[in-house]
Amino acid sequence: MIPQDDSQDIAAWMEEFARTPLNAPPLADPSLLWWKAQVLRRWDAERRASEPIEVGERLQVGVGVVAALLLLGWLWRVLRTTSGAPSLVTATLVSSVLLAVAVLFAFWGRSSSRPS
């Protein structure tokens, strides 16, 4: 049970609270809320539809980098056994440039396909 002193304090506070005006902002326009929900639904559908494409792009980037690394290894092995040091340096530089270009295109392609 609430003591008599507390119940009078609570009643006084409730009466004062009831007298205070409510300055609540007006509710948002229902058509605006519906429009936002439709836009969000459309964006979600687009994201779900583009997921397989993004996975394929990541796979393509990975395969390209692995292929560039395999090319570097193959050129290193072939040119080391067949010719002298100048050819080896040239092959290493060419394959390193190819690898760098493949990595740059991989990152450039991923960053340009993202929405802002």
Image (spheres, helix red, strand yellow):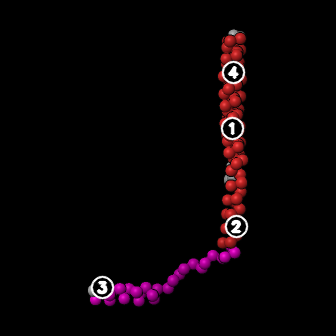
Between the C-alphas of marks 2 and 1, the distance is 34 Å
Q: How far from the left and from the top, in percent, is residue 101?
A: 71, 32
Q: Residues within 10 Å of mark 3 (few under 14, many from 20)?
A: few
Mark 3 — residue? 2
Q: How far from the left and from the top, in percent, is residue 104?
A: 68, 36
Between the C-alphas of marks 1 and 3, the distance is 72 Å
Mark 1 — residue? 61
From the viewer's side, name the closer residue of 22 and 115.
Answer: 115
Mark 2 — residue? 38
Between the C-alphas of marks 4 and 1, the distance is 20 Å
Between the C-alphas of marks 2 and 4, the distance is 54 Å
Circle 2: residue type: Gln
Q: Magenta stretch: residue 10 in it? A: yes
Q: Quadrant of the N terminus?
A: bottom left
Q: Is residue 56 at all visible to an observer of this figure? A: yes
Mark 4, secondary structure of its residue: helix
25 vs 33, left or right, is left
